[in-house]
Image (cartoon, rainbow, N blue to C red):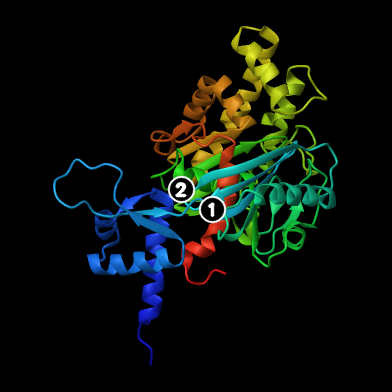
Amino acid sequence: MRTGPSQDEIRRQNLGALLRYVHVHGATSRAELTSRLGLNRSTIGALTADLAGAGLVSEGAPKETGRAGRPSLVVRPESDRVYAYAYSIETDRLRAARVGLGGELLDRRELDRPPGLLVDEVVPLLAAAVKEMQQSVPAGSIRVGTGAAVCGMARRDDGLVRLSPHTGWSDESLTTRLRDELGGGLPVVTGTIADLSALAEHVRGVAAGYHNVIYLYGDAGIGAGIIAGGRRITGHGGHGGEVGHMVVNPGGRVCSCGSRGCWETEVGELALLRAAGRAGLSGQAAVLAVVDPAARGDANAQSAVRQVGDWLGFGVANLVNIFNPELVIFGGTMRDLYLAAAAQVRSRLNSNALAACREHVRLRTPKLGDDGALIGAAELAFERLLTDPLDVG
């Protein structure tokens, strides 16, 4: 009867652990890897040789050292040669990037997204952006797959976009269409922009080192990426985090989802623009056209910001009571609104959230900015490689 993992399984696990460490932390000395991974020097040397032989890392002397004696060799991810493609499919724009091992953005493209653009029109545009970037990829490079971040509800197992009311998509097989268009037989994985932005900030952004995080992402609607105990919480099927459809005002406006009084009807960009007398506009530029005058003392803009900021704090207080996070991050248009109404959000949080839940929570904006969705989508694509570096091809 088998009592434990085989030597090959242990070796693969150790290879994955070493590659993951270098992917997250960048160039790392053998001495640090020995200490951090709890393995001896000869094992680290053998694992590094295996990864270098596979073209995933390289070894060399440190660029500078102030220590006497022979310096420890440094292991570096092959960021230029090992990469994933990443997409961010947003309400008003499409973005594509080539992201190297280690999280380095190597190349990118951005396109405006006209209203009403269907999946069959979006996918060829994204594929064309990849073909452009492919022309500058070094010979012998290793592509591990593709990740896509999408506004709306994306099913975890197959990337089916179940609902994206602000784009008109419903039950669209995005992953399948992207895979067919890109070719090559490599996997395409999908998640929501909020969830993948949270992942990126947790791995290499403002949330690094925190284990309980809520990332609020706003465009036309609102979604959340939730990390609890260091793990992403996506729910059964991957549809968790739809905090924009948390009902906060039962007598409020009808939401695009068909319910009434959802949080996004009170704090989304459309709510802000409506309160400022700018109904019919949309997008970050329109939001800034309210937020900037408010900062300069425009009374009408300030009233709109106060109204929406109060509802923002109301919802954040509910989320803090439920999830007890260490950090709440405001991304997308939520960043602009939070910066304009930070004092009001904190005031509402102090009055509505339980002291035990609120006293340690920090409110922040993303370190990675808009790149979080692309970097998070790439992280999703790299996961198979990081789990088993010998099983990618």
Residue 197 visible (yes or no): no
Residue carrying label 2: 203
Left or right, 14 with reference to 116: left
**x and y percentages locating residue 262 in the rendered image:** 71, 38
From this viewpoint, which residue is outermost toward the bottom?
1
* Residue at the image position 56 percent from the left and 49 percent from the top: 99
Left or right, 184 with reference to 169: left
User: From the image, which quarter does the N terminus lie in?
Assistant: bottom left
Query: Is the residue marked by circle 1 packed among few (<14), some (14-19), or many (20+) residues within 10 Å?
Result: many
Considering only order in the chain, which callout, 1 or 2, is on the residue closer to the N terminus? 2
Residue 332 visible (yes or no): yes
Determine the secondary structure under disc 1: helix
* Residue at the image position 56 percent from the left and 44 percent from the top: 106
Residue 102 drawn above or below residue 173: above
**x and y percentages locating residue 265 in the rendered image:** 73, 33
Residue 268 drawn above or below residue 25: above
**x and y percentages locating residue 79 in the rendered image:** 48, 51
The amino acid at mark 1 is Glu
**x and y percentages locating residue 69 in the rendered image:** 14, 50
The amino acid at mark 2 is Val
Query: Is the residue marked by circle 2 packed among few (<14), some (14-19), or many (20+) residues within 10 Å?
Result: many
Residue carrying label 1: 379
Could you say which is closer to the camera, residue 159 or residue 252? 159
Could you say which is closer to the camera, residue 234 or residue 72? 72
Label pair 2/1, CB-CB below 8 angstroms: yes
**Where is residue 171, by image quadrant?**
bottom right
Determine the secondary structure under disc 2: helix
